[in-house]
Amino acid sequence: MLNGKHIILGITGGIAAYKSALLVRLLIKRGAEVQVVMTPSAKEFITPVTLSALTGKPVVSEFFTANTGEWHSHVDLGLWADAMVIAPATACTIGKMANGVADNMLVTTYLSAKAPVFVAPAMDLDMMAHPSTTRNLELLRSYGNHVIEPASGELASHLVGRGRMEEPENIVRVLDDYFASSSRLAGKKVLITAGPTYERIDPVRFIGNFSTGKMGYALADAAARAGAEVTVVSGPVSVRPKESSVKVIPVESACQMADRCMEIFPQTDIAIMCAAVADYAPAEQLDKKLKRGNCETMTLELRRNPDIAAMLGKNKRDGQILVGFALETDNEEFNACRKMESKNLDLIVLNSLAVPGAGFATDTNAVSVFFADGRRTDIPLMSKADVAGKIISLL
């Protein structure tokens, strides 16, 4: 999958820079064209001559060549690349990338990159565990960057712990998998619901839930990167898709979401029902604000909302794939599988609030995927973007 791809390899000033030579060699053996961009301190660990000999290209480190004044355009590099890999990525460079400190050629190239960016951290275990590093990596993930998690082992300090840059062979495998997945859904139309629904009580109050839409939008981005034409029917959220090709149709209530989904579903190949749709809505919506009054209690009459997944399941044609989501607090597997069967789903994704870091309003998730044919796949706690990628790969 790397044959003919343009790869920018960013190298920063850490002892793991010696692995960059092997990484370059492996990328080129796969048919990639590699342009190395180094920070000045990286040259203390591996020479530009070595990397230039391996790539067949001059190494870029400064904004211009001192003796000729030739300008190195970070914008042109960003447009040229199919992917940018920073390996090793030191805590310093990660911090600069996360906060837009564009004081060297590598960071300015990163800020100009239109292609996916992969970051392979490498540092001592205490630096890796520091809250600032954790925060900066989460910021990079939130920007859509792919973090290639470091391994555990003996470090330059001779301490043993997490912080070793992932091995070059595994970094190449990550890139291979990414480009392989980018064509998996080519030509497919995908419908995704995301976020909560708001069911109005009066002009200022509503019944809702804690969904932020992060999981649904992560799925939309992952499906778009896999080549699909993606439409998101979204309840009220503050998140936006990172992929510009994703079409968003905003709605507020469950009935509005159901209407849009029924319109779009006949033309789709895959529908993923990720929204947290309110089961009930007020039977009456008041035109004016409901006053508090002197009563100690208040009673609202509720009506059942449409079950969107079940509606689509009844109308599903041969060849369509329908995916549901379930968030359960007890009898989780039984309840999820019962929903899958009753709604004619092909698979259902089970969230559990019992797993710390999973569920609403987090950047991470851990899920179990159940298939109608009895198979099961467990996806451990990781970023919602990574969970979404794994779900899309299962499709």
Image: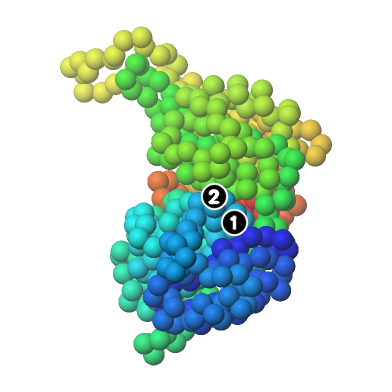
Res. 98 image quadrant: bottom left
The residue under the point 59% across, 56% down is 81
Residue placed farthest to the right in the image?
Answer: 318
Residue 288 to residue 74: above or below: above
Residue 63 tag number: none
- Residue type, mark 1 in image: Ala
Estimate how packed mark 2 is, as few (under 14), some (14 to 19) or many (20 or more) residues with alpha carbons within 10 Å.
some
Image coords of residue 353 (percent x, y)? 44, 52
Residue 248 to residue 155: above or below: above
- Residue type, mark 2 in image: Lys
Q: Secondary structure at mark 2?
A: loop
Image coords of residue 275 (percent x, y)? 53, 37
Question: For this rendering, which residue is in front, 81 or 49?
Answer: 49
Badge 2 vs badge 1, beta-carbon distance below 8 Å: yes
The residue under the point 42% across, 68% down is 66
State the separation of the CA atoms marked 2 and 1: 8 Å
Residue at label 2?
A: 114
* 129 with respect to 43 (left or right): left
* 220 with respect to 270 (left or right): left
Residue at label 1?
A: 81
